[in-house]
Amino acid sequence: MSGWRSFGLFGVLLGLVALPAAGVSNFQLVGFTGQKFAGNGGLLAMSTACQSQFPASRVCSSSEVANTVKLPAGLPGGGAWVQPSLVGGVLIGTVPGAVDAQGGVLPGTVPCGGWTRADNGAIGLAVTAAGQVTALTCDNALSAACCALTPVPEPPTSLAEPAAGVALASLAVTKAVHSAF
């Protein structure tokens, strides 16, 4: 019986960790720049373009794009450069590489040689308008993906709203934990 209590308590704690608190701000994707950059565009130039088009923004990381709660409407096609969220390294044959939090592996340890290379021998990380994170050669001219601090939406106030399934599941786990004691 104590195993079920532990499992139920773990479920409740997992639910609390997975749901952001209302009113908390996170960096979220707010749009792609109209200006295009090859891989040698420079991080500061891309962030400056973000700030001029989307005030108080900067170039997104791949994790910020993946964790965006509400995607902006009308993202232009063609994709946009993002900073990788590096979580480790790997050898690709004898060449060092970097592992991105979204699962991609990049040859080298920084995108496009630190945003200084615009050739097809260097690789950078980009996001498509559909939200797919992909590795591309640095000779591509892409927008920059821009992120800004935006508040996390308030949780639903009615069980009829879309997150009702999550709310009901949370209630079920809570009830199971209390009844196990």
Image (cartoon, rainbow, N blue to C red):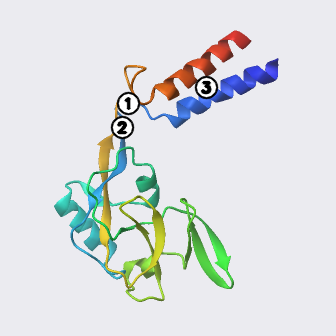
Q: Residue at x 67, y 29 (%)?
A: 10
Dots 2, 1 in contact, CB < 8 A: yes
Q: Which residue is mark 2?
A: 152
Classify mark 1: residues with Cα within 10 Å, few (<14), some (14-19) or many (20+).
Answer: few
Distance CA(mark 3)–CA(mark 2): 21 Å
The CA distance from mark 3 to mark 1 is 18 Å
Label 2 Cα crowd, 10 Å radius (few <14 / some 14-19 / many 20+): some
Earlier sequence position, callout 3 versus callout 2: 3
Q: Quadrant of the C terminus?
A: top right
Quarter where residue 29 is shown: bottom left
Task: Say which label, 3 or 1, has the lower sequence index.
Answer: 3
Q: In x, y percent, where is residue 119?
A: 41, 89
Q: Is residue 12 above or below residue 141?
A: above
Disc 3 target residue: 12
Q: CA distance from mark 2 to mark 1?
A: 6 Å
Q: Nearer the viewer, residue 42 or 3?
A: 3
Q: Position of residue 53 (x, y in %)?
A: 18, 61
User: Left or right of 80: which side holds 4?
Assistant: right
The correct choice, above or below, for 113 with respect to 169 in the image is below
Q: Is residue 108 left or right of residue 131?
A: right
Q: Is residue 37 found left or right of 3 in the rendered image?
A: left
Residue 132 image-quadrant placement:
bottom left
Q: Earlier in the sequence, mark 2 or mark 1?
A: 1
x 31%, y 79%: residue: 141
Image label count: 3
In terms of secondary structure, where does tag 2 sit? Answer: loop
Q: Residue at x 28, y 59 (%)?
A: 75
Q: Position of residue 149 (x, y in %)?
A: 31, 47
Q: Which residue corresponds to mark 1?
A: 22
Type of amino acid under label 3: Val
Identity, as a three-letter code, of the amino acid under mark 1: Ala
Q: Secondary structure at mark 1?
A: loop
